Amino acid sequence: MPVSSSKSPRRSTSNSARRVQSSQGAAQEVSSAPPAAAPRPAWRVVWGFLRGPYPTLLSRAVVGGVFLLAGIGKALDTHRFAAEISAYQLMPAALVQPLAVALPLIEILLAAYLLIGLAQRWAAAATGVLLLVFIGAMAWALVHGLTLDCGCFGNALGVGVLRETVSAGSIARDVLWLALCVHLMIVPSIWSIDAFRRKRTRKVLCQETSS
């Protein structure tokens, strides 16, 4: 009996020591674990998405497609487009017909540049300036109580379904397209002639430096 009683305290002491060591090891593992990553702000998530290749391609397709359709529609009937410009009462009569001929050609040219991704930022900036002019003209018509055909798409391919009256909705639509132009001015596109030129320039520079 005395022998057995002398062994039990030693066993309990060793067991308690093992428990302490295991708890210390677990504490060290917890302290060494990497902290949980903080959630990214919402604006960073949105900005990361807008910088991707697909949003820029979509912005180019939308703005370029709209201006191509609008330019072709106006070019098909410049006389009617001239009448729509004259109805705004914003410019001398002598400039109405030349503008009715030149503006559709400018819109078609800008649309081509945007669709193929050539001089994207300059084309988007020029398109944005045109949209600001259109927005200002429509806002002027609304303020003065004029009920006008907006003339945004002209007689597009002979289809009158795209013709609309100047309204807050037509202004909001142009504001949306203006936002897409700003997007294209800030973020360069990957699938474009500009990107191809940048890659070719870097390749030439690398070959020159290596030689």
Image: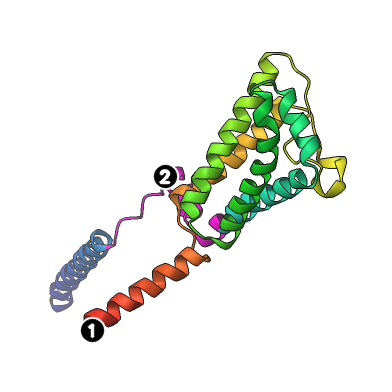
43 magenta-colored: yes
The part of the image, by quadrant, that contains residue 61 is bottom right
Q: Using the image, determine if residue 175 lies above or below residue 188.
A: above
Q: Residue at x 50, y 66 (%)?
A: 193
Classify residue 21 by image quadrant.
bottom left
Q: Residues within 10 Å of mark 1 (few under 14, many from 20)?
A: few
Give the number of the disc on residue 6.
none
- Magenta span contains residue 8: no
Residue furthest toward the top? Answer: 144
Position of residue 18 in the picture relative to residue 64 (left or right): left
> Which range of residues does the magenta coloring cover?
33-56
> What residue sits right under mark 2 in the picture?
41
> Image height check: is 174 above or below 202?
above
The x and y percentages for residue 36 are 35, 55
**At label 1, which amino acid type do we have?**
Ser
* Mark 1 to mark 2 CA distance (whole Å): 42 Å
Left or right: 103 in relation to 10? right
* Residue 119 or residue 202, whichever sits in front: 119
The location of residue 33, given as percent across then percent down, is: 28, 62
Mark 2: secondary structure: loop
Which residue bears the numbered disc 1?
A: 210
- Whichever of labels 1 and 2 marks the residue nearer the N terminus, that label is 2
Name, please, the residue furthest toward the bottom.
Answer: 211
